[in-house]
């Protein structure tokens, strides 16, 4: 079978950002990544598991080593929160060099375990880049706040349709 391809004849479906909200998801891929400035991060691909956006992917990077101390602090905090949500923090009995562990170990620790997280839309500060989804506020599925359906509004007399047929109670004959 030939692998014929022409981008000019390929239909494309525009992808909208996932709207703000809390979603049950799982990591489907987590990769170690080094940048050219000596930084190290875990790059995660998350898949939404249920609801209207089931199957959609959102992406997040966790800066473990970064020249910018604030970026590194935020990345490490977010990664620690994800570890708590996945109930894997207890596996880290000592510091682990994430650069040295195998990709299989990374996958076994982080992938295919459900959690709940808040997805937001992050506006780009640079016009050459599009807005993107961001992921944060990681919670275990059991600890995540459940979205409550508001109780049905009671129907008031003003909202009731007029009665059809029958007589008014005060016009009924006593038996």
Image (tube, rainbow, N blue to C red):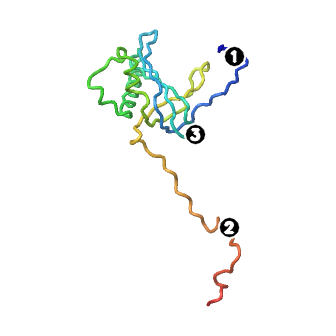
Secondary structure, mark 3, is: loop
| Label 2 – label 3 distance at C-alpha | 34 Å
* Up/down of 3 relative to 11, above or below: above
Percent position of residue 107, x then y: 41, 23
Q: Residues within 10 Å of mark 3 (few under 14, many from 20)?
A: few
Residue 169, by quadrant, is bottom right
N-term mark: 1 or 2: 1
Which residue was labeled with disc 3? 52
Image position of 7 (left or right of 85) = right
Residue pictured at 44% horizontal, 30% vertical:
112
Secondary structure, mark 1, is helix
Residue placed at 37% from the left, 15% from the top?
Answer: 99
On-image quarter of the N terminus: top right
**Distance (Cα) linking label 1 and label 3:** 29 Å
User: Looking at the image, which is closer to me, 121 or 97?
Assistant: 97
Expressed as whole percent of the image width and height from the top left, the position of residue 117 reads 46, 35
**In which quadrant of the rendered view does residue 168 lie?**
bottom right
Is 174 on the left-hand or right-hand side of 92?
right
Other residues around mark 1 within 10 Å, as few (<14) / some (14–19) / many (≥20):
few
Which is closer to the viewer, label 1 or label 2? 1
Sequence-wise, the earlier of marks 1 and 3 is 1
Residue occupied by mark 1: 7
* Farthest-out residue, bottom: 175
Under circle 2, the secondary element is: loop
In primary-sequence order, the first of circles 2 and 3 is 3
């Amino acid at each position: 079978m030939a692998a014929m391809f022409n981008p000019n004849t390929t239909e494309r479906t525009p992808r909208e950002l996932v709207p703000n909200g809390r979603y049950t998801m799982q990591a489907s891929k987590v990769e170690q990544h080094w940048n050219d400035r000596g930084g190290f991060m875990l790059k995660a691909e998350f898949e939404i598991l249920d609801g209207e956006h089931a199957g959609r992917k959102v992406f997040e990077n966790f800066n473990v080593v970064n020249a910018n101390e604030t970026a590194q602090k935020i990345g490490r905090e977010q990664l620690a929160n994800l570890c708590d949500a996945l109930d894997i923090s207890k596996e880290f009995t000592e510091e682990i060099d994430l650069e040295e562990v195998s990709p299989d170990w990374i996958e076994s620790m982080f992938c295919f375990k459900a959690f709940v997280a808040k997805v937001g839309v992050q506006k780009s500060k640079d016009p050459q880049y599009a807005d993107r989804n961001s992921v944060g506020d990681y919670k275990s599925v059991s600890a995540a706040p459940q979205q409550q359906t508001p109780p049905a509004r009671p129907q008031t007399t003003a909202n009731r349709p007029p009665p059809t047929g029958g007589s008014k109670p005060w016009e009924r004959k006593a038996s």
